[in-house]
């Protein structure tokens, strides 16, 4: 039996322009927009840290240096907090930081699609399995999505794709997988279809932005032709890899917020605010009043 190699590295593609949030994202990367009091990308990094990820590979573009600064120490700020006795705030900054040397940043340089962004991380990831986390997608559950995926991966190996259920009538808007053999925590994937025609989807399980992939996908991506949107698509490469290796789905039962959309971003702020005991009473009261007026 082939030994299952540990997933140590995570790739986060953060090179997108965030045009749907202009003018807010003219100078601020969309990944740094805050859900309550943390940038969107920090939620994703914390999810990965909880899953045991040891090294973070950010695939960036121009005007994204603030992301690198965010995951670095800021001596002046820390010294000020320490002098003022703000130990809670200081600890929150310390807890969010990956360890020294555990972050890498590489440039995509041209907007050629998600598949190209993943390929740009090839030399840093090397010949080992890795997690791919789309930073627009923020998950909310008692157990992190990637933690559940790692548990399933360590049982079955291969490649893992996180999925969640959607309204069957909306399946044509998503990447959908076909459901095969049931596994503990998920199922075998029989097919993957990107935005199937209405009424033709093999299931209502949609791909929600979390993957564990084997390194052989880099070779496929290096030869991958452009697909939808004239971009190199990671889904096209996964379909080719599925001819050689098994793909399994981890069924995520929590909530997924697409913070790349305005509605998803606002809903994420509401949901996470209501999780916070320090602000929940005020937020809940104001929401009730707002809804009554609407």
Image: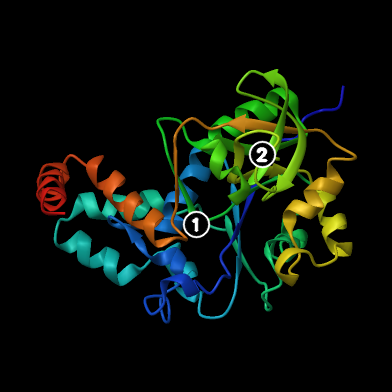
Query: Could you say whether the residue bearing mark 2 is in a helix, strand or loop?
Result: strand
Q: Residue at x 66, y 75 (%)?
A: 111
Task: Give the class, few, some or many, for how many residues have Cα within 10 Å of label 2's Cα (few <14, many ≥20).
Answer: many
Quadrant of image for the N terminus: top right
Does residue 91 appear anywhere in the picture? yes
User: Viewed as shown, does residue 141 lie left or right of 197?
Assistant: left
Percent of width and height locating residue 47: 48, 43
Query: Could you say whether the residue bearing mark 1 is in a helix, strand or loop?
Result: loop
Image height of 14 relative to 272, above or below? below
Quarter of the image holding residue 190?
top right
In front of the other: 181 or 156: 181
Percent of width and height locating residue 108: 67, 72
Q: Residue at x 66, y 40 (%)?
A: 199
In front of the other: 109 or 188: 188
Image height of 253 relative to 102, above or below? above
Percent of width and height locating residue 67: 47, 68
In front of the other: 37 or 69: 37
Colour style of the rendered protein structure = rainbow
- The alpha-carbon separation of the residues under discs 2 and 1 comes to 16 Å
Image height of 27 relative to 172, above or below? below
- Reading the image, the residue beneath label 1 is 136
Quadrant of image for the C terminus: bottom left
Does residue 7 appear anywhere in the picture? no
User: Viewed as shown, does residue 161 lie left or right of 25?
Assistant: right
- Reading the image, the residue beneath label 2 is 161
Answer with mark 2 or mark 1, whichever residue precedes in sequence.
1
């Amino acid at each position: 039996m082939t030994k299952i190699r540990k997933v140590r590295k995570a790739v986060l593609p953060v090179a997108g322009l965030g045009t749907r949030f202009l003018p807010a994202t003219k100078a601020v990367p969309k990944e740094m927009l805050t859900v309550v009091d943390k940038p969107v990308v920090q939620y994703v990094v914390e999810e990965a840290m909880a899953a045991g990820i040891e090294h973070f590979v950010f695939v960036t573009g121009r005007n994204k240096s603030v992301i690198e600064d965010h995951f670095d120490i800021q001596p002046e700020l820390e010294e000020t907090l320490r002098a003022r006795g703000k130990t809670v705030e200081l600890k929150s900054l310390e807890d969010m930081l990956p360890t020294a040397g555990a972050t890498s940043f590489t440039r995509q340089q041209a907007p050629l699609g998600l598949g190209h962004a993943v390929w740009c991380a090839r030399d840093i990831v090397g010949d080992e399995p890795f997690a791919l986390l789309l930073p627009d997608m923020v998950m909310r559950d008692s157990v992190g999505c990637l933690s559940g995926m790692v548990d399933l991966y360590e049982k079955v190996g291969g490649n893992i794709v996180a999925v969640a259920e959607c309204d069957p009538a909306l399946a044509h808007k998503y990447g959908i997988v076909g459901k095969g053999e049931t596994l503990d925590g998920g199922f075998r994937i029989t097919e993957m279809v990107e935005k199937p025609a209405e009424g033709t989807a093999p299931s209502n399980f949609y791909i929600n932005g979390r993957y564990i992939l084997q390194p052989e996908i880099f070779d496929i991506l290096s030869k991958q032709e452009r697909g939808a949107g004239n971009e190199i698509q990671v889904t096209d490469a996964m379909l080719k890899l599925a001819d050689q290796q098994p793909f399994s789905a981890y069924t995520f039962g929590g909530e997924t917020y697409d913070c790349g959309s305005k509605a998803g971003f606002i809903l994420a702020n509401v949901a996470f605010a209501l999780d916070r005991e320090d602000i929940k009473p005020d937020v809940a009261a104001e929401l009730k009043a707002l809804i009554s007026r609407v």
